[in-house]
Amino acid sequence: MIGALTWSVVAPLACGALCLLPGRAARWFALFGALVPLAVGLAALGDFARHPGADFRLVESYPWAASVGAGWTVGVDGIGAAMLALSGLVAAIATISAWNETRNPRVYHALVMLLLAAMNGVFVTLDLLVFYVCWEVMLVPMLALIGVWGGEQRRYAALKFFVYTLAGSVLMLAMLIMLWNRTPAGGRTVAVQAIEIQAHSHDGGATLHGLPVERFSDGSVSVTVPRGFDLRHLQLQWRTWEGERVLGMSLAAFGFLAVLLAALVKVPAVPLHTWLPHAHVQAPTAISVLLAGILLKLGVYALYRLAWPLFPAQALHWGWLIGVIGVIGILWGAWVALGQRDLKRLVAYSSVSHMGFCLLGLAGLTAAGATGGMVQAVTHGLGSSLLFLLVGVIYDRAHHRNVDGFGGLATPMPRYAWILLIAALAGAGLPGLAGFVGEAMALFGSFTAGGPFPWLGALAALSVILSAAYMLWTVKRVAYGPLAHPEHAAYTDLDARELAATVPLVVLIIVVGVWPAPLVDALRPACENLVAHVRSALP
Amino acid sequence: MTGELSHLLPEATLAVGVLLVLVADMLLPAGRKASAGLLGVVVCFGALLAAAVSQRGSVSDMLALDALAQLARPGVLLATILVLVAGRAADGRDDGHAAWVALMLALALGALVTAGSTNLVSLYLGLEVMSLAGYALAGWKAGDRRSAEAGMKYVLFGGAASGLMLFGMSHIYGLTGHLDFAGIGAALATDMPLPVLAALILAGAGIAYKLAIVPFHFYAPDVYQGAPALAVAALGTIPKIAAVAVLVRAISLTVPDTLVPPTAFGLALALAAIASLLVSAFTAVASRDAKRIVAFSAIGHAGTVILALACMPGIMPVAAAAFYLAAYTVANIGALVCLAVFERERGSAALDALPGAMRQRPWLTAALCLFLFSLAGIPPLAGFLAKWGVLREALRVGLGEAGREHMTVAALILLASTAVSAWSYLLIVRAAVLQPAPEQPRAARLAPGLVAVVLVCAIASVGLGLWLDGFASIARALGG
């Protein structure tokens, strides 16, 4: 019997196949397919919140190819659990928002399910090869979803998205193969610190990550890592990657840059962000929600799961650069958002800005900062999904997204105006709403970190002014003031379906904003462990 | 002698089959001529059976039935069966189908001879049989100017390549006094003077032509675009299987192990591979015809196989090349069979002619996309795993062996070209799936054979992609 995490991938796949059946049940299958990973993710997250711990839970392992050492190995720590829950939630919301899709709804929902399965695969797998496969599989449904169901320039946007992100990740494939190649066929014996065994061994030190521990008379401890793709095993060998050479740099440096490139394209970090406004503007509302709510988080997740654990010494060495890239994104995104007239572009650039906090938080290498970066990933998933839904709501009515073409919508649509105000305030980082928690923790981490980070944090803090400016200005122009166009008076307020999609997000934004402790508690041990691992690479 | 000849049972079956098909064509009544195709398939299955039971050995120092040949034989025959089952003659005419089938069988016969040859003479013989059949297949639509042009180009370039090859072979014979690979290898064991290297490379021209790698690729785009799609499916895959098989044997027998890696020969292979990848990637994106894009990208796929061979000596590079060829063959035949349908219904496979395909034939178009994604190397399809295998070999050699660091660069170029060529495949996907089109007439039902071929290729493209142990299994088959 397969376990919960495998179900979180299998259920969307199976529901995706069921979606193709004739009839009008596709959306129900899709909703169910999204609720399964949501339930699994929430259960795991709750477990981590009640019993904090850094180790992977719900681990399952099935062999796939013995000759290669790849397998279906899944497990989540707090980070993975949070991402899984987020992905299920956002997919469910996106399905509700596309409830009345009329163009080929069966294929549409099936593709969303395929996308969800691939994303969940990335979040739950502990196998680098499966990680890469799922990472790339996502491109295909996205290509179709943007290219078929998108706006005017959908074809160009879809192809650009596909090739841009594919090009970003090809080096990661080279990295993956190099790591495999440089492990001897018989495995490699690596020294392990006793403290590591104490922390991560669950059977009194007999095994570590499923590998038998050898103890020597001089007190040293080692394990023999087989050739394969298990991330926990690869991580044990990080010192070896530092010593290997490839193209005039160390293998670790090459691998780090490869993951960095793939991740920064996905995040997206300035200057690799140019695909995002296109993709967002052209994508249909529900796909924008998925894109902003989950896909962007994959880049951050790859840094947390691959770049930092596998190449800690490089992370120490290049941390400042990631911080700088993060801050550039924060300020640039906010500045450009200020000048946007298209509401979707505005939200897209605000995403660029907000995702910069994830990079800044992680780069500073403090437990608070790293946790804050991940919290920011989750809360941005909630907030930007909500904003894109709200843009979609008025686009459905007005058939344009020009910010100047609205005004005074609060009169005909009071509920809409309230929710828009909450979403904008969350985006602006108002304390008491979700957006504040991650940003504050990331900034706090930066101020306590050494080197250039206090300065970077100070610069990043400036964006709070900018984001308050563009968010509130937007709300004012759209919702308040006198009714700009008399025909808008006939607009109906949010209907039941739209409320079903937006209200859960509003509730979560407020709950996480007021009571972030469970989320933070669940994330913190894994982030602390990561920071400690990277710091152990200090010479 | 009879023992030796029994090794040739598959080849004999095909040779007899060619005659049988032609005779049957005379005997069959006018309305039933199409059953020649069925006969051809039966003959291929017979040959497959014969290949399965045949023993290893050699025939008069001309043909070797080694592990390599036993791997190549089913490959060639299965590909032939796929193309034969996929359709009647390319333009759907009833008459002349027997000739088409006979030519396909002759192509397979030439491929088997080529794949098994251990001697320059049998190699030349095999290549020429393939070429002659290929010339006719490329120019099959005699009334169509583009097809005629394709045939003519195939003849002219093929003639030049085979001239170069003969020239090189005569030099090899003159310099070493041997025609068989093993003898040539023994003569070269001590040293490889520059003239011999030049002669080897010239002799390789014929093989390079069949593979369509740079600089012998110029015919490919025009021939692919002009020739009927099913002929392209055959010409783009079957000769390549044979050429790679004989190339592997020639390299392992003639080029001494000690000379392969850092010397000019290994470097020449790597350079040809890199050039093919780059030319393929950057010319395909500029094409506006689906078959032309497939042709240009086929140059890159052949380059990838050559890149695997540049990692020799060893069994794993050969396994990687074999796996790549298998993945490429099923995806390529699948894609071209789909394009054959569109070509027939829409008059051409130009990108301008494809919009609306998704509406008219959703399943076939979805299958086409699957094949294109496999060719582009998107996981979890066969093309991805195949590329993975080649990369693994190139990076193993490039990072692990002194003097072969260029293989790392070659691997990175392969990756970069992957991203570029993905764009060109997406051009086809965009035209067929994303482009808006006016309401399409209802499509007629597809022939069951064609559906079966598309299905088999699709299942194989997915199945091979999950067969991670495939490399080890092929290596075992080759080593045992």
Image (cartoon, coloured by chain):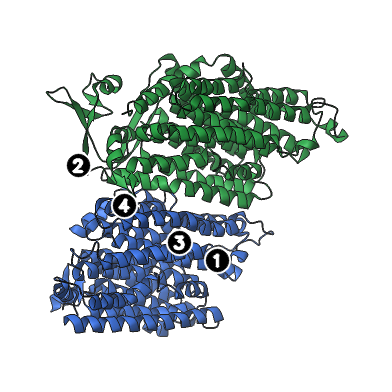
Chain colours: A green, B blue
Check disc 2 and give the amino acid type.
Gly
Check disc 3 and give the amino acid type.
Gly
Separation of marks 4 and 1 at Cα, in angstroms: 31 Å
Choose the circle earlier in sequence order: 3 or 4.
3
Dot 4: chain letter? B
Separation of marks 3 and 2 at Cα, in angstroms: 39 Å
Specify few, some or many for label 3: CA neighbours under 10 Å numbering under 14, 14-19, or 20 or more: many
Specify few, some or many for label 4: CA neighbours under 10 Å numbering under 14, 14-19, or 20 or more: many
Residue B384 is situated, as x and y percent measured from the top left of the image, at 40, 52
Residue A271 is situated, as x and y percent measured from the top left of the image, at 55, 42
Question: Answer yes or no: do the residues labelled 2 and 4 have beta carbons within 8 Å?
Answer: no
Name the residue tied to disc 4: B395
Check disc 1 and give the amino acid type.
Ser
The quadrant of the rendering that contains the N terminus of chain A is top left
Please give the label number shown on residue B334. 3
Please give the label number shown on residue B39. none
Residue placed at 64% from the left, 20% from the top? A430
Question: Answer yes or no: do the residues labelled 3 and 2 have beta carbons within 8 Å?
Answer: no
Using the rendered image, report if marks 3 and 2 lie on a common chain.
no
Name the residue tied to disc 1: B287
Name the residue tied to disc 2: A186
